[in-house]
Amino acid sequence: MKKYIGSIVCAAVILLSACKKDDYKNDGGPSNPYVDMTTYDFLKSKPQFDSLVKIIDHAGLKDAVNSDVTFFATTNYSITGYVTAKKNQKAVETGNENFEFGIDDIPTKELADSMKTYMFKGKINRDVITVSGKIYPTLLTTPPAGVSYLIKFRRAFDYSQFVDYVDYVSYVKVVGTRDDREPEPDKIPESQKDRSIDCQTSGIITKTGIVHVIDGRHRLFFNAQPLGN
């Protein structure tokens, strides 16, 4: 009975969250996962992906996005911090803070290569993702040495009074070995720790692939450069 009641509650959560500012923020995937559009057209139809679409266009990745891939999509919030950090980097390098800077000022190849780390060949949907996770190759054929990408569920008990658990899809940048398989993960140096972020919505099925939407608190590419003043 607990699981049955839980399914009703989760459905209610999804419906309520759809009425909020971010139409795609919920805990277990959209109520109707099917979208009768290509992945690119779906992203372009939603204002929260305006900056992402601009990056895709600038980097010449429309065909890649519309191929048979699973795409971890980032919202405007994720990209704003990244662009601000890149502007600050240039300001420090040039000693000048008074200039306009945007996505078009970032080198095309830099964006194209980095964006491919959010793309995985084939359809990796919730039905094949596990709590233990799996390393998947990205569309970036030559990733940085010692870096790989893990897709897994993070099992949480946020709604324990209604359901046994909730599985959030997590996108993980693994540095070296997996932190969760180290005997003493607390002793891993900060620079060598894996970087992980949950998806705010998972399992959107477009005409061409799968879209998982990453939480807006994620800064694009796990960028950690200072933002400046």
Image: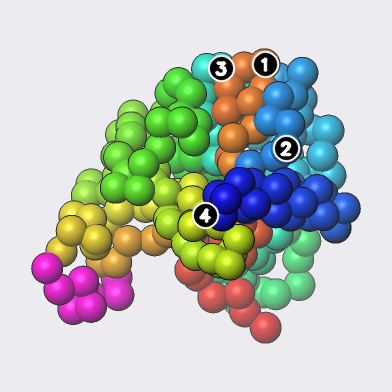
Alpha carbon of mark 2 to alpha carbon of mark 4: how far?
15 Å
View extreme (bottom): residue = 229
The residue positioned 50% from the left and 70% from the top of the image is: 225
Tag 2 residue: 31
* Amino acid at circle 1: Lys
Say if 148 sits above or below 160 in the image. Answer: above
Q: CA distance from mark 3 to mark 2?
A: 24 Å
Pinpoint residue 191: horizontal percent, then vertical percent: 29, 70
Residue 109 on image: x %, y %: 51, 37
The earlier-in-sequence mark between 4 and 1 is 4
Residue name at image x 39 percent, y 46 percent: 152
For mark 4, what is the residue?
166
**Foreground residue, 167 or 201?**
167
Span colored in magenta: 183-191
Q: Are marks 3 and 2 in contact (CB under 8 Å)?
A: no
The residue where tag 3 is placed is 67
Residue drawn at 79 percent across, 33 percent down = 44
**Amino acid at circle 4:** Val
Amino acid tagged 2: Ser
If the image is split into quadrants, where does the C terminus sit?
bottom right
Please tell me which of labels 2 and 4 falls first in the chain.
2
Viewer-nearest of discs 3 and 2: 2
The residue that label 1 is drawn on is 207
* Residue drawn at the location 33% of the way across and 34% of the way down: 136
Q: Is residue 3 visible?
A: yes
Question: In the image, is residue 214 part of the stretch drawn in magenta?
Answer: no
- In space, the residues marked 4 and 3 are separated at their CA atoms by 30 Å
How far is disc 4 from disc 1 in space, using C-alphas? Answer: 27 Å
